């Protein structure tokens, strides 16, 4: 009985997480969040592994991402607070690669990345018409 109750509670918690995570297209004003995350050496080590000191170079990366015609980049919002980003990177007509980063450490390991991944997959398959995904 207690195990069943625990499983039900877990399901409710998962549903709550799914309901409070939102994705929205990145905006110019989101630069501040990306700069913070890209300047975090621990986070960079876990993701690309390439730490860049120059704000100007990072700004170039950000605006290239923002202005991409083929790729789709989203901010992950938890109760309207930016906690990370997810990118749907076009590979070919039917295939994309997805990258996800939870930039705010206090939200690591709590299911928010999983929820954001599910939302991004819905967008990629249902709205953008992709058929195949890779996780980068």
Image (cartoon, rainbow, N blue to C red):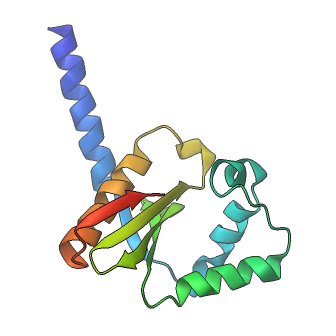
Q: Is residue 4 above or below residue 18?
A: above
Q: Is residue 49 above or below residue 85?
A: above
Front in this rendered view, residue 117 or 81 = 117
Q: Quadrant of the N terminus?
A: top left
- Would residue 43 be found to the left or right of residue 79 on screen? right
* Number of marks present in the image shown: 0
- Would residue 93 be found to the left or right of residue 8 on screen? right
Seen as rendered, the residue at the extreme right is 53
Residue 55 visible within the image: yes
Q: Position of residue 80 (x, y in %)?
A: 44, 65
Q: In the image, what residue occupies the spot 64% across and 68% down? A: 33
Give residue 66's quadrant in the image.
bottom right
Seen as rendered, the residue at the extreme front is 92
Q: In the image, what residue occupies the spot 42% across and 63% down? A: 98
Residue 80 visible within the image: no
Give residue 38's quadrant in the image.
bottom right
Q: In the image, what residue occupies the spot 21% across and 77% down? A: 129
Q: Position of residue 101 (x, y in %)?
A: 54, 56
Seen as rendered, the residue at the extreme top is 1
Q: In the image, what residue occupies the spot 24% across and 27% down? A: 9
Q: Position of residue 120 (x, y in %)?
A: 33, 64
Q: Is residue 49 above or below residue 127?
A: above
Give residue 14's quadrant in the image.
top left
């Amino acid at each position: 009985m207690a195990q069943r109750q625990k499983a039900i509670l877990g399901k409710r918690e998962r549903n709550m997480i799914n309901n409070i995570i939102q994705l929205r297209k990145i905006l110019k004003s989101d630069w501040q969040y990306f700069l913070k995350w890209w300047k975090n050496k621990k986070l960079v080590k876990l993701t690309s592994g390439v730490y860049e000191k120059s704000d100007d170079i990072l700004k170039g990366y950000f605006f290239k991402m923002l202005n991409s015609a083929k790729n789709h980049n989203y901010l992950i919002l938890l109760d309207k607070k930016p906690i990370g980003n997810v990118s749907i990177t076009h590979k070919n007509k039917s295939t994309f690669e997805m990258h996800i980063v939870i930039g705010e450490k206090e939200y690591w390991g709590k299911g928010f990345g999983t929820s954001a991944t599910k939302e991004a997959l819905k967008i990629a398959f249902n709205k953008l018409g992709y058929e195949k995904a890779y996780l980068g």
